[in-house]
Image (tube, rainbow, N blue to C red):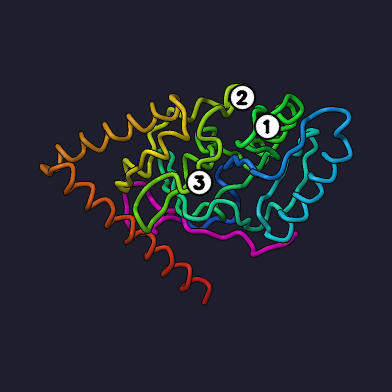
Amino acid sequence: MANEPRWYALMERGSAAATGPSRSEPMGIVFHITESDQAPFEAEQNRNLKRLGRDLLLYARSKRAYHFVIDRFGRVFRVVVESDVANHAGHSVWADTRWTYLSLNASFLGVAFEASTRTDEPPMNQAQLHAAKILVAMLADKYHLSPQNCVTHAQVSVNPSNMRIGWHTDWGTGFPFQELGLPNNYESPNPALSIFGFEYDDSYRTATGPDLWRGITSAEEQMRESAAQHGMTLTAYRTSLQKKYRQAISALRERSGTEEN
């Protein structure tokens, strides 16, 4: 499916203004779980499995929800063309060593695994793992994606209304980064905390794993050190970072409107 053409403005890390260049190619990948209806992955369930897969693809197509879906048989389906935006990340934050990314629908590709966290089965089977390894390698080579920008939905999703991370928590634990040839990005300091002062609640802690919390701990330590360097209490410094987030969102919207006109 076609959707809106991809276009977004880069933001220099540490800045509250959209001062970087505009881009039309993706900078990373966000990995998702579809949380769709499941049947046991057994031979006698083949007909049901195929029906559920078709239903998922029709839904994803109607919502323009992802760029790629990997079904439970390991088949890769392109849903939204790579040149266009997919509706997969919503309110979201990530950053690499140079740029900060907000609202990752445009700047990142969305790759979803047909799976559910509401069953006893692992979210990813061997066929999906094999397909994902090939897909990630292809996309990384095609778009020169940085491995540090290949992350899970639970790492990037935020809720601006209460300034908490984890509006969505899919792949909050158990994502096979290393098997896909990627670094363990769970351990990367979470930029929503360290750059913009977001917080989290007990439900996020429950839905995520220890690897991810190493990244949370690192981000919180960075925030405490920065607060001390600025001669501010942690609470006051967090408030200033949250204000910077709101300014950054406004700056991006203003720039987007100006360049579209």
- The verdict on residue 153 being magenta is no
Image position, residue 106 (x, y; %)? 56, 55
84 over 70 or under it: above or below: below
> What residue range appears in magenta?
1-20
Q: Nearer the viewer, residue 31 or 53?
A: 53
Secondary structure beneath dot 1 equals helix
Q: Which residue is tagged 1?
A: 137
Q: Which residue is mark 2?
A: 181
Given the image, on which type of amino acid does mark 1 rest?
Ala
Q: CA distance from mark 1 to mark 2?
A: 8 Å
Identity, as a three-letter code, of the amino acid under mark 3: His
**Magenta portion: prevailing SS class:** loop
Residue occupying the point 80% across, 37% down: 75
Residue beneath disc 3: 168
Q: CA distance from mark 3 to mark 2?
A: 25 Å
Q: Label 1 crowding class (10 Å Cα cut-off): few <14, some 14-19, many 20+?
A: some
Say which quarter of the image contains residue 58: bottom right
Give the side of residue 235 with respect to residue 144, left or right: left
Q: Earlier in the sequence, mark 1 or mark 3?
A: 1
Badge nearest the viewer, 1 or 3: 3
